[in-house]
Image: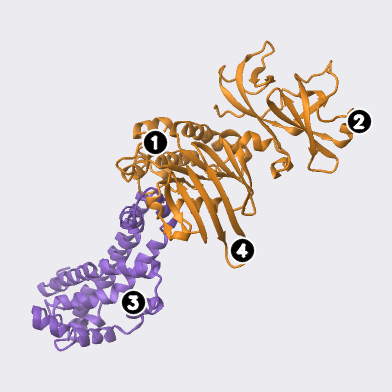
Chain colours: A orange, B purple
């Protein structure tokens, strides 16, 4: 669907970007990396707002950019909807005027959700007559999402759309982003340096560092790898897809996943809701015998599949398999030798019910 | 305060000349501002300096230059008169032209200030939404720079009411034809017993100028509210 290959250098001795990746289907592909890794440059080059030194961008068979053949479509003919960090709503138009701006300029044959549908999807009905200056930051971003979607793009590009918002506003907009992802049926390139947004939204991940692609693939597969910079973070861990199974007699929420069930204090969601949990490696402990008399509620039989170096000399990552699901546990080198931990060994994984960060984005 | 017919005529003529000068200069000034702010071409600084000349050159010199160019035997004025029968020297149209040339840099400056207020990010956003060059100029850039255009127009109008040197040199001081307020004041001070007339006309001049400035301020506030910058 989308192929990107770019080379770009800032200034004479600035940092060089050399990145290539592909997006095969609809859904969110997160470009993830620290500030200055080139992710926003990639987005601008795909949108046509920046001309890279050389490169090729092909979307659904249409060549948007091919410097070798001298092709560079202007942004207005690329049909890539962009949601900017600062919303960039037109201040002289009402919310309705902003939403219709892109809609009026969409090609006649283009299909996509209609005005009323988008207004309902993003909860904009009460805002239509307002000027952007009278909107909150979260509301502005919702209008910007609607405006981009109504232009009937073939691809949505989002450049850190939540980065300018405080935590409260982010939590307010995130569910709308998830709804848009599910309703739009479009490939979405989502630039972010916030892991929570990756956890909540992304289907695939392109991991960037210093202008290069370190790894790309499914989010759950990449987060389980210990050889990437992701593993060095304090919140390193795996993502587990779960479904709310109900409430247990003690009032805890039952979350079913492939291979078992977890009890969590996360806020109750309707039964059947699909969630993605980040299980941080530092919250997982292991025992060689089934423990008794312990406050920890989640004690799951697991098998050690591999032991890999951790972020410090004293630490290792244990890769655990619980049925088809994977977990990471961060333990000391000392524990490994003391307990005789080795690949193939059966252990008990301990997870406290209060440690899961609930991720409300239903999937 | 009673004004004589001639005095009224000077007031009306001043308004007429100032209005025509703005009508004449506004569109070229907006285009020039765009060219100077957004254009990248050799000689841009030279053009910039040329546009600003009327601000620093003595107005009499501007009037003299117009006389050379648009006089009946000038390279532009000659053909205009011979082919189209249009005569600019010593006419109201000529007074308007001289005033327009003098206030041109004022409009260009105000429009450029207005243009600099326009966030290029909004134009980039319009592009990604499918708006081509002319489309996004008309629907985004122009509305957002309109406070600058309006401010330029009002300032040029107010300044045009008082243009003296270029008008008297190029269009002369003909009552009813080119004798605007400042020229009438000048004539009054030159004639014996004209102090009272001069004082009355000066008072009117002052009133018009203050009204113009207040109007400009009022319009600017309304525009900023409309554009959501209030």
> Whole-percent x and y of residue B191?
17, 86
Q: Are labels 1 and 3 on one chain? A: no
Which residue is depicted at the point 61% across and 59% down?
Answer: A16
Neighbor class of circle 3 (other Cα within 10 Å; few <14, some 14-19, many 20+) is many
**Marks 2/3: CA–CA distance:** 85 Å
Neighbor class of circle 1 (other Cα within 10 Å; few <14, some 14-19, many 20+) is some
Please tell me the numbered disc located at residue A127.
1
Quarter of image, res B108: bottom left
Q: Are marks 1 and 4 in contact (CB under 8 Å)?
A: no
Identify the residue under disc 4. Answer: A14
Identify the residue under disc 3. Answer: B51
Label 2: chain? A
* A36 sits left or right of A137 in the view: right
Labels 4 and 2: the sequence-earlier one: 4
> Whole-percent x and y of residue A359?
61, 29
Compared to A148, does A41 lie above or below? below
Q: Are labels 2 and 3 on one chain? A: no
Identify the residue under disc 2. Answer: A338
> Whole-percent x and y of residue A202?
57, 36
Q: Are marks 4 and 2 in contact (CB under 8 Å)?
A: no
**Marks 1/4: CA–CA distance:** 44 Å
């Amino acid at each position: 669907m989308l192929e990107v290959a770019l080379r770009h250098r800032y200034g004479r001795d600035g940092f060089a970007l050399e990145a290539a990746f592909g997006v095969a289907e609809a859904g969110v592909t997160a470009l993830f990396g620290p500030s200055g890794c080139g992710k926003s440059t990639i987005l601008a080059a795909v949108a046509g707002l920046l001309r890279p030194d050389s490169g090729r961008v092909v979307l659904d068979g249409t060549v948007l950019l091919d410097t070798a053949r001298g092709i560079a479509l202007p942004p207005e003919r690329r049909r890539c909807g962009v949601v900017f960090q600062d919303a960039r709503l037109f201040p002289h138009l009402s919310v309705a005027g902003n939403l219709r701006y892109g809609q009026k300029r969409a090609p006649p044959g283009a299909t996509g959700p209609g005005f009323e549908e988008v207004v309902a999807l993003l909860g904009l009905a009460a805002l239509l007559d307002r000027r952007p200056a009278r909107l909150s930051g979260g509301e502005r971003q919702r209008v910007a999402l609607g405006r981009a979607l109504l232009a009937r793009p073939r691809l949505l590009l989002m450049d850190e759309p939540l980065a300018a918002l405080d935590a409260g506003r982010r939590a307010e907009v995130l569910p709308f982003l998830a709804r848009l992802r599910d309703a739009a049926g479009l490939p979405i390139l989502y630039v972010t340096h916030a892991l929570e947004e990756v956890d909540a939204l992304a289907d695939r991940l392109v991991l960037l560092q210093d202008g290069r692609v370190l790894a790309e693939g499914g989010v759950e597969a990449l987060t389980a790898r210990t050889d990437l910079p992701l593993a060095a973070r304090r919140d390193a861990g795996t993502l587990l897809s779960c479904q709310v199974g109900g409430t247990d007699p003690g009032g805890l929420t039952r979350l079913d996943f492939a291979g078992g069930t977890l009890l969590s204090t996360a806020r109750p969601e309707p039964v059947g809701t699909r969630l993605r949990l980040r299980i941080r490696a530092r919250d997982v402990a292991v025992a060689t015998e089934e423990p008794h008399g312990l406050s920890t509620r989640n004690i799951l039989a697991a098998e050690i599949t591999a032991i890999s170096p951790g972020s410090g000399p004293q630490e290792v990552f244990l890769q655990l398999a619980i049925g088809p699901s994977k977990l990471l546990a961060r333990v000391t080198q000392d524990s490994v030798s003391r307990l005789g931990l080795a690949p193939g060994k059966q252990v008990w994984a301990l997870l406290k019910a209060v440690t899961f960060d609930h991720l409300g984005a239903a999937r | 305060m009673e004004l004589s017919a001639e005095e009224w005529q000077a007031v009306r003529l001043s308004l007429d000349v100032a209005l025509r000068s703005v009508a004449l200069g506004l569109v070229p000034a907006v285009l020039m501002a765009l060219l100077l702010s957004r254009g990248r071409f050799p000689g841009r600084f030279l053009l910039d300096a040329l546009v600003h000349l009327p601000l620093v050159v003595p107005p009499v010199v501007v009037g003299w230059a117009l006389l050379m160019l648009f006089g009946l035997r000038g390279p532009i004025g000659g053909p205009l008169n011979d082919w189209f029968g249009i005569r600019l020297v010593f006419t109201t149209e000529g007074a308007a032209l001289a005033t327009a040339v003098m206030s041109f840099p004022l409009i260009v400056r105000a429009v450029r200030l207005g243009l600099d207020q326009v966030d290029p990010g909004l134009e980039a956003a319009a592009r990604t939404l499918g708006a081509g060059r002319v489309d996004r100029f008309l629907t985004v850039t122009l509305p957002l720079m309109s406070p600058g255009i309006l401010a330029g127009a009002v300032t040029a109008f107010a300044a045009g009411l008082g243009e003296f040197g270029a008008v008297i040199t190029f269009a002369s001081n003909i009552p009813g034809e080119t004798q605007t307020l400042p020229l009438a004041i000048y004539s009054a001070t030159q004639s014996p017993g004209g102090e009272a007339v001069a004082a009355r006309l000066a008072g009117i001049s002052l009133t018009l100028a203050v009204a113009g400035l207040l109007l400009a301020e009022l319009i600017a506030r309304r525009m900023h509210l409309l554009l959501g910058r209030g």
